[in-house]
Amino acid sequence: NALDPQSRRLLFGTMPLPGSTTLPCRSNRHGCVHSGTIVTLPRDVKLLTAPDGTPLMGSTFAPELQQLRAEGGHTTLTDLAAGAALPAGRSLELLIEFNHPAGPAEESAASSFGVELIGGVRVEWDPAASVVRPSPCVGRGPGNGSSAMECLMPLSLHPGEAVRMHVYIDEGFVEISVQDQAMLMLSSESTANTSRLLGGVGAKRV
C-alpha cells in the first residue's frame, strides 16, 4: 500500500444483495443488471496493538475515505443513553464508542449491545460469548448459508477496552468494522432512515 508501507490493500470484497434485489447497470445497456452480490469498500489489512501490547491482525477502511469526511457534515454527540437515537440518513458514516461495564465481573455478565441501522440491520457484541453477532445473518461458511453459527465473528476485548464501531451506510448497504478487527457487510430492503443504539449500554461518543 503506497500510503502505508506497514499495511496491505484489499481492493474489494463482495456482499450479497438483499433477497432477490437487482440493481441497474450505469451503462444503460438494455437488460443489464447486477444481481447476487455487490462490491464492497476497500480496506487495509495491518498489524495493530492491543492495550496490553498484544499484536492483533486488523482490518480498517481505506484512508482515502477521509476525503469524504472532509467534504461532509460533522456532528459530535456525547453521553448517549442506552437505546438513544443516532443521526438519521442513508448516506452516512458513524464512529461509535460505547461505554463499558465497570469491571471484569460486570463485563462478563453484561448482555449484548450494539446498533440497529436503517430498518432492521443489527450488529451486536456479546460480552459473555466474546462474539460479534450480525443480523440479518449472511453465512460466511463454504456454502454461504444462513446458519446463525456461521455469522458469529469471534472478538475478545482486553479489560477496560471500549467497544468501537465504524459504520458506513450507502442506501440499503451497511458496512461495519468493530474494533478494527471484525468486518461485517449487511444489506436491507427497508426504506427507513433511522438508527439507534441497542441493548443496555450507552455511547460515550458518536
Image (cartoon, grey):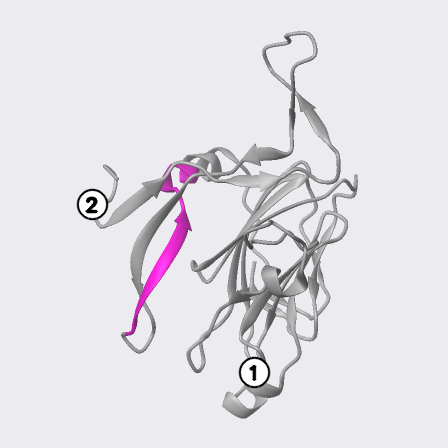
Q: Neighbour class for label 2 at 10 Å: few (<14), some, many (≥20)?
A: few
**Quadrant holding the N terminus:** top left
Q: Quadrant of residue 160?
A: bottom left
What type is the residue that disc 2 sits on? Answer: Pro
Instruction: Give x and y (percent) for residue 127.
Output: 57, 78
Q: Is residue 78 visible?
A: no
Q: Quadrant of residue 53?
A: bottom left
> Of 121 and 19, which appears nearest the observer?
19
The stretch in magenta equals 54-66
Q: Which residue is mark 1?
A: 101
Secondary element under disc 1, as helix, strand or loop, is loop
Q: Viewed as shown, does residue 19 lie left or right of 161?
A: right
Instruction: Indicate which disc residue 5 carries.
Output: 2
- The stretch drawn in magenta includes residue 174: no
Residue type of the residue flagged with mark 1: Pro
Q: Residues within 10 Å of mark 1 (few under 14, many from 20)?
A: some
Indicate whether 54 appears above or below 57.
below
Q: Quadrant of residue 100?
A: bottom right
